[in-house]
Amino acid sequence: MNADRTIAIATIAWKNVARKIFRNIVLVLAVSLLVALLVFAMLFAKAVREDIAAATKRLGADIVIVPPEAKSMAEEFILESLEKTFYMDEFVYESVIDMPEIAAGTYHIYLNTLDSGCCSIDEGQVIAIDPDTDFVVSPWLVGDARLQEGEVLVGSYVHEYLGLIDTATLFGSGVKVVDHLEETGTGLDHGIFMRIQDLKKITAEAIGQYKPNNISIIFLKVKEGLNVDQVVAKIRNINPRIGIMTRGSIGADVRNTLRDIIRVFSITIAISSVLAILLAWSTFTALANERQREVGILRAIGARKHHIVQMFLSEALIISLLGGITGCLLGHYLISYLAGDFNLLTRLGAQSALSGENLLLSILALLSGMGVCLIGALAPIIRLARMEPLLAIKED
């Protein structure tokens, strides 16, 4: 009996919604825009946080050391694939590599950015590495190539345009591309990797600002079980004038920017919620005024207050559900197809993926939008349900 009554009420509610379809579409659109904004904001924040965490983990290092003035540039290369050059003395590496707390260490040298052109390697960051100590690049190799004289490796982005050829030129000399990296989601994807030993064959004019005995960035692995912060403190005592980043601190500037963006989203969502509540209140106030006689007749023939509330809340539920589903689809569309206009999303590779967590966030946004609509509709519905039957008929 209760199931039949619920189906009957839902059927009546749907017919009433369809009867005033154009007026209700406005409320559907308001809810859909609110839900779309919620979905976009939550997926945006989640994607950026996950990308930062994944990028730092993929480097394989617990501690990263750079010149103190180059921390932001290093982060831009690691997280956003923006080509950078900066240098410090090789003595910094020598002073920390023999520390008992260090399990492994290596360093890279960032050279001039190459622009694409005829017969030369496509645009990318040229990076000199030491194959004997490297643990940052080698885990991502598709094959098992070991760099020899005159050979280079390329990141996944460069490989898409270049492939594995032996007719490329690097700093005026012919080189052979022997292997490429899997996609890492870091600046390594834009890298062209050569041996540090081959630097001595390049003229000073071709190599740019780099000078012998200079390095750009140091990657260190801490021995298992040791506290990274304590090791960092010890390194600072040895070399106070260096920039140090850990897995947890890389991307601090991006995280601060993200917090500011989330604040803007929060204010916008709060304003949109208030407007949606007011629109729902206005819509259902007008609806209540139009259907007082109908409610009075229903009450007179035996309908109870909770039946009236249930019927009108069913209409609000249908409207909010339509808006919520539309909003979820719109939010995923925005993050998937329109995010190319946002530099932060494009550089970090943030996207909308079909995952359990993303589905859960979408459902949460849908329920929040529906809740806002129901809150706005509740006051006029309760007022209508409390009217005396004869008074409701008479006031019509």
Image (spheres, helix red, strand yellow):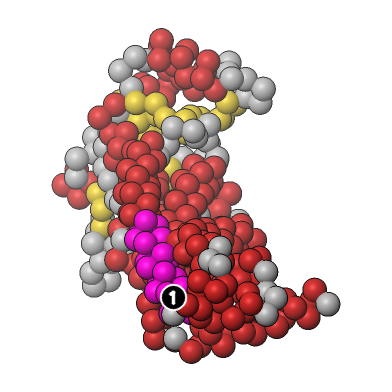
Which residue is farthest right? 1
**Residue span colored magenta:** 272-292
From the top left corner, tell me how far across and down residue 103 is, in percent.
60, 26
Given residues 391 and 357, the one toward you in this image is: 391
From the top left corner, tell me how far across and down residue 245 is, in percent.
42, 30
Tell me, yes or no, whether the highlighted magenta stretch contains residue 277: yes
Tell me if mark 1 has few (under 14), some (14-19) or many (20+) residues whose alpha carbon lies within 10 angstroms of its own.
Answer: few
Q: What residue is disc 1 on?
A: 395
Asked whether residue 306 appears in the rendered view, the answer is: yes
Q: Residue at x 24, y 72 (%)?
A: 118
Residue 21, located in which quarter of the rendered image?
bottom left
From the top left corner, tell me how far across and down residue 73 is, in percent.
29, 40
Q: Secondary structure at mark 1?
A: helix
Q: Residue at x 46, y 14 (%)?
A: 233
Above/below status of 310 relative to 109: below
Which residue is farthest top? 237
Q: Amino acid at mark 1?
A: Glu
